[in-house]
Image: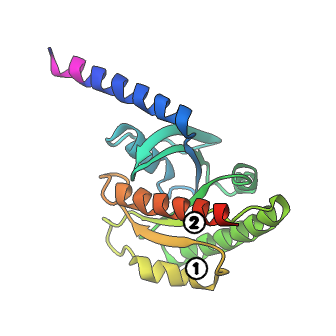
Amino acid sequence: MCACLWAGLVGAAQYLLWEAAALVRPPAHVVLVGLDSSGKTTALFRLRYGHYVNAVPTVGFNTEKVRAGGGHWLVWDVGGAERVRPLWRSYTRATDALVFVIDSSGGEERLEEARVELQRLTKQQTAQCVALNRHRPPLLVLANKQDLPGAREPQHLAKALGLPELPDSQPWAVAPACAVTGEGLDEAMATLHQMVLKTRQAHKRQ
């Protein structure tokens, strides 16, 4: 049996297993947002296909079912251009988790722009969760492009984005990654998976 045929059979079997698992427990709904050119779509396609896919700028959104970090995810990748950002609120209204992708090597102006957008988004999430009487979804900041010169450390990004000032009820973490090579992505999703499980357990106890 040729390698390509075998790979196809393995892929088909894996897909069927994912679909069967989804019947038992639906995949967690996660939304990828962030400024344009931060690497959201590259990260999504790397998670979905296991290799680099040359991505074009997202005008609307992409969606894929993904197995990563021990979790089963339905991932929505929403465009990051300035004119599209007001639509983030619609996609994040009832999400199980939120991933904010940031270019770790970007300039100070882009970092400040990302901080403003992230703070605006978390405030919107607060209002939505109060209205829906639900827990705040975990927030993972994916510190992408760690392979580029001048990439900032996760601790530096956390402080620059104002994450320590978020309410105690807002779970958050920062994970370094490189979407092009895939390095750090599975570990980042494993962190997010654990955060989602803790949030669900806390909800059951109430």
162 on left or right of 141? right
Q: Position of residue 57 (x, y in %)?
A: 54, 45
Q: Position of residue 113 (x, y in %)?
A: 62, 72
Instruction: Name the N-terminal-most of marks 2 and 1.
Output: 2
Q: Residue at left 34%, top 24%?
A: 13
Q: Name the dominant secondary structure of the magenta segment.
A: helix
Q: Amino acid at mark 2?
A: Leu
Instruction: Please state which of residues 203 and 193 is positioned toward the viewer in this rendering.
Output: 203
Q: Residue furthest right?
A: 131
Residue numbers of the magenta segment: 2-6
Q: Residue furthest top?
A: 1
User: Residue 58 appears in which quarter of the rendering?
Assistant: top right
Q: Which residue is mark 1?
A: 163
Q: State whether residue 100 appears in this view.
A: no
Q: Residue at left 38%, top 39%?
A: 53
Q: Amino acid at mark 1?
A: Leu
Instruction: Please state which of residues 144 and 4 is positioned toward the viewer in this rendering.
Output: 4
Q: Residue furthest front?
A: 205
Q: Residue at left 65%, top 41%?
A: 60
What is the spatial separation of the Cα atoms under label 2 and label 1, in whole angstroms?
10 Å
The correct choice, above or below, for 51 with respect to 23 in the image is below
Residue 3 belongs to magenta span: yes
Secondary structure, mark 2, is: strand
* Quadrant of the image containing the C terminus: bottom right
17 on left or right of 77? left
Q: Which residue is mark 2?
A: 139
Instruction: Please state which of residues 129 and 101 is positioned toward the viewer in this rendering.
Output: 129
Q: Position of residue 87 (x, y in %)?
A: 74, 51
* Quadrant of the image containing the N terminus: top left
Asked if the residue at tag 1 contacts the one at tag 2, i.e. Cβ–Cβ closer than 8 Å, the answer is yes
